[in-house]
Amino acid sequence: MADFLYRVGRLAFRRRWYVALVWAAVLAAVGLGALKAPGAADEGFSMPGIESQKAFDLMEQRFPGATADGATARVVFVAPHGAKVTAAGNRKAVEDAVADLADGSQVASAVNPFQTKAVSEDGTTAYATVTYKVAADDLTDASRTQLEKTLDEARDAGLTVDAGGSAMDDGGGAGGAAEVIGVAIAAVVLLVTFGSLAAAGLPLLTALIGVGVSMATILALADALGLSTTTGTLAMMLGLAVGIDYALFVVSRYREERAKGRAPQEATSLAVGTAGSAVVFAGLTVVIALAGLSVVGIPMLTKMGLAAAGAVVVAVVIALTLVPALLGFWPNAVLRRRARRSGRGEAETKDNGGTRWARFVLRRPLPVLLLGVVGLGALALPTTSLQLGMPGDEAKPTSTTERRAYDALAEGFGPGFNGPLTVVVDAKGDDDAKGAASTIAREIGATKGVVSVSPARFNEAGDTAVFSVVPSTAPTDEKTKDLVTTIRGERPGVESATGATFEVTGTTALNIDISEKVQSALVPYLIVVVGLAIVLLMVVFRSLLVPLKAALGFLLSVLASLGAVVVVFQEGHGAALLGVETTGPIMSLMPIFLVGIVFGLAMDYEVFLVSRMREAYVHGETAHQAVTSGFRHSARVVVAAAMIMIAVFAGFIGESDSMIKMIGFGLAAAVLLDAFVVRMAIVPAVLALLGDKAWWLPGWLDRALPRVDVEGEALTRAADTREPAPAGQETAHV
């Protein structure tokens, strides 16, 4: 591996014009393809194998066109204090607003609340449902403007008016601001780390090129592969983060080799052969973690994982080809100013912050280990009370009209009104379909926790009925989950009495089913991903205990970060500092996101840090000396890489969407804990306690595993026999 990558780096350095032109051509080609490709359709969310999805599929089959994905807006009218919406003046204002809403070119219907009895019992609140002919993404600015104008006119009449529903979604989310903040902080970190504008700019440039290639490819293939508009979000986030990190490691190793007096071409080749090997294996662990998301069984998540894995592959290839090519163009520019004047790299000091920290840990490994494990364990404790769900409008800031509409409906019609259950009765083959549906509705209506049941609506064939069930509790309340379980538990008795079957669906039931499926998929996912990564790390480190230690450390950090998410977003401690106004269940996919993404990134740091220790150990240093050497060479770079990751992820905490806040906070916390507590403290403490045993591998396993010279032992031995080029020759390409 190291020898092959050495030749790749040498070829890229010597043929730098060809490499640069090839990448420019690739970027232009995929960019042109993205511009010409049809827009990516929003395929919606689906999860095969759960009851709510089966019921939804049955509705699409039996009620053709009834489940069309046209946008909807639910406009809520609240009368002034002490008044009612049924009063003459208020009623006229509501009816005028509904008439104006119905007068849009994209509007299919706008329902008058006084005709459909959509008025609260106390007469203070009413709502009108506006249905559009097109999906939310296809609403024109004119339609959105008309909706906002109508709401303002109704407010001018003295009513409190707010609106929720898919029509209010403007397609916003994690946008340019988050990425710009992350890139800006990354640039500062790189500049401080390298002390050179060129050295700081090169990783940023190559990472942006990699993200450009990845995102353009995703957009170009979106229609052909059925990718949604959200597929590339994770690819952009991870592509940017790992793209900077991988280039950072190669450039750092290049500067180190230059400090030994090697010529630019030789230093570049060695950097790609050694650090490049670590990049390849680190990238493989990330790809395994992301591709493993397919185990969960959510098509959207599978596509997001595979797209992000593709972005990581692009980042690896760029680090191995474009980075050495750019070093060939400006071999001395990435060095510090003093080193550029002398024509050779600045020698690395034997004693730096990394070595001092390593010696501190080596002198007291047991206290450091216990403090790290106990601290992470304490942070992980809140995960025992973890509640999963899919937060909706109730989790949005109170400054949004969607949140105010949600609160108004909950106050006027009850907390369960915002999350009704949909019951689909399949009476095909039953002689008395209407009687069966009536019996099922009556039985469910008598269940404790049910406020009301709507009249059943039948399809044209008369063999399928649909009705709504309004719970007495909010959609994210645990009692609502218990109610769904109770209704489904009553099904065998009801079916035997009526001969018809029914299923429960709706947004609330769908979220409950998703949470349960994600929880059941988490353990198999962990087994697959961690198992494959342990095997890969065994090949890299030729050790049994180091990979096991790496995996256990990761589990500690991910549980601790999930505990931190629970403390802030579920229990509300410190939530105000992050702008979180409403706490509640943690997003169902959050544990999977944390495990998948953070595992790959954690193994990045493990490979880059411990591979230098392994390299020193193979070259004859003692186990303790190897730990110190690894920290001397890698600690500063690993810290810089972690800070870049944290900056990229933390940038998303500033977004208004609570779910994006949660993802950004969780990933930033996980990287912080894994890099600074696990990799920088627990890892050296464990290696100090194990000594030579850390690098032990059973003979039979040693023979079975393929041999990969990740440390580049043969390369460095061969390079040491060659005479370094004179200083004057090293500046020839500047």
Image (spheres, helix red, strand yellow):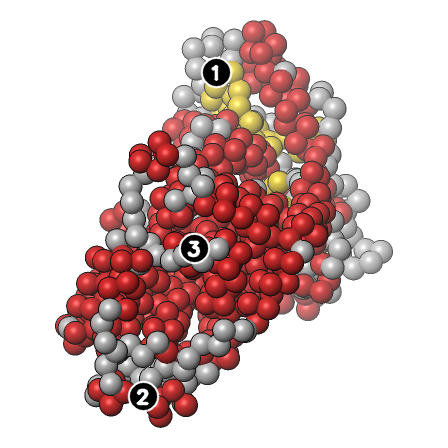
> Can you identify the residue that label 2 sits on?
343
Q: Nearer the viewer, residue 82 or 662?
A: 662
Circle on res. 427 = 1
Sequence-earlier tag: 2 or 3: 2
When the figure is inspected, residue 677 is found, relative to residue 122, above or below; the finding is below
Q: Secondary structure at mark 3?
A: helix
Give the Cα distance between marks 3 and 1: 72 Å
Give the Cα distance between marks 2 and 3: 31 Å
Give the Cα distance between marks 2 and 1: 84 Å
Residue 414: x and y in percent read 74, 41
Residue 536: x and y in percent read 37, 43
Amino acid type, callout 3: Tyr
Q: Nearer the viewer, residue 624 or 288?
A: 624
Residue 583: x and y in percent read 70, 51
- Mark 2 or 3, closer to the camera: 3
Disc 3, disc 1: CB below 8 Å?
no
Circle on res. 235 = none
Name the image quarter holding the C terminus. Answer: bottom left
User: Farthest residue in the right direction?
Assistant: 82
Q: Nearer the viewer, residue 575 or 426?
A: 575
- The residue located at (58%, 62%) in the rendering is 358
Amino acid type, callout 2: Gly
- Mark 3 or 1, closer to the camera: 3
Amino acid type, callout 1: Ala
Q: Secondary structure at mark 2?
A: loop
Residue 400, quarter of picture = bottom right
